[in-house]
Image (tube, rainbow, N blue to C red):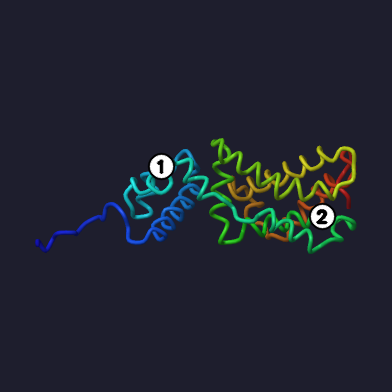
Amino acid sequence: MSGTQGRGTRRGRRPGESGTRSAILTAARKLFAEQGYDSASIRDIASAAGVDPALVHHYYGSKDSLFAAAMRLPNLPELVGGALAANPSAASDGRLGELLVRTIIRIWEDKTLQRTAIGLLRSALTHERAGAMLRDFVRGAILARVADRIDAPDRELRVSLVASQVVGLLMTRYILRMEPIASLDGEELVRAAGPTLQRYISGDLAGPPPA
């Protein structure tokens, strides 16, 4: 046997299916977060994971299926719902807007979720599946959790305004990285944006935000 045999880039299957799947998902989350769905290629993802592109197709089939697996955000409706349930008085004492902003920011800045969340947000601008996943998050984690705390005939409009504010805030802070919002302390952002959400929840939609 030649002493040089087996050297160079390894092709084909890595030892351990779970390790290979994990490496592919980690690489996919990184590239989708940095480049968005359209620019991140299967070949680039495979290269970042240290595997042959054929293995990506073997485990995930298509780029669309890989994206869905990599961008799945675990239990976000439960995280938001848990924060609201832990503060039952927030709706009655005018703090629901601040609580909602604080909870969303905390989720988006969780190091275990941030790359996935930003990848989903960035890709939602150009990719239908990402847009649908982001809508599902907004509906499940925001609209459904806030709607049952609003007792008003225009509830649907109010929760839609809340969603528009939250998504716009996330885009400005994490994708556009517009200053000073991008580097603003989380609690400062809560104090600045919370009253606007609170007006959408319980205030006069034709008037100024509550003091």
Residue 43 placed where, x, y %? 36, 44
Residue 191 relative to residue 15: left or right: right
Q: Amino acid at mark 2?
A: Leu
What residue sits 37% from the left and 46% below the top? 58
Which of the labelled discs sits on residue 41, or is there none? 1
What residue sits 52% from the left and 45% below the top? 68
Numbered disc total: 2
Which of the labelled discs sits on residue 53, or is there none? none
Residue in front for this viewpoint, 22 or 117 = 22
Mark 2 lies on residue: 96
What residue sits 65% from the left and 48% below the top? 170
Residue 108 placed where, x, y %? 63, 55
Residue 156 placed where, x, y %? 81, 38
Residue 126 relative to residue 12: left or right: right
The residue lying furthest to the left in this view is 1
* Occupied quadrant, residue 110: bottom right
Quadrant (top left/top right/bottom left/bottom right) for the N terminus: bottom left
Question: How many C-alpha atoms fall within 10 Å of the one at disc 2: few (<14), some, or many (≥20)?
Answer: many
The residues bearing labels 1 and 2 have C-alpha atoms spaced at a distance of 41 Å
* Occupied quadrant, residue 89: bottom right
Residue 111 placed where, x, y %? 57, 61
Image vertical order of residue 164 relative to residue 27, above or below: above
**Element assignment for label 1:** loop
What residue sits 77% from the left and 44% below the top? 162
Residue 187 relative to residue 1: left or right: right
Image vertical order of residue 168 relative to residue 20, above or below: above
Proximity of marks 1 and 2: CB atoms separated by less than 8 Å = no
Q: Amino acid at mark 1?
A: Ser
Between discs 1 and 2, the one toward the N terminus: 1
Question: How many C-alpha atoms fall within 10 Å of the one at disc 1: few (<14), some, or many (≥20)?
Answer: some
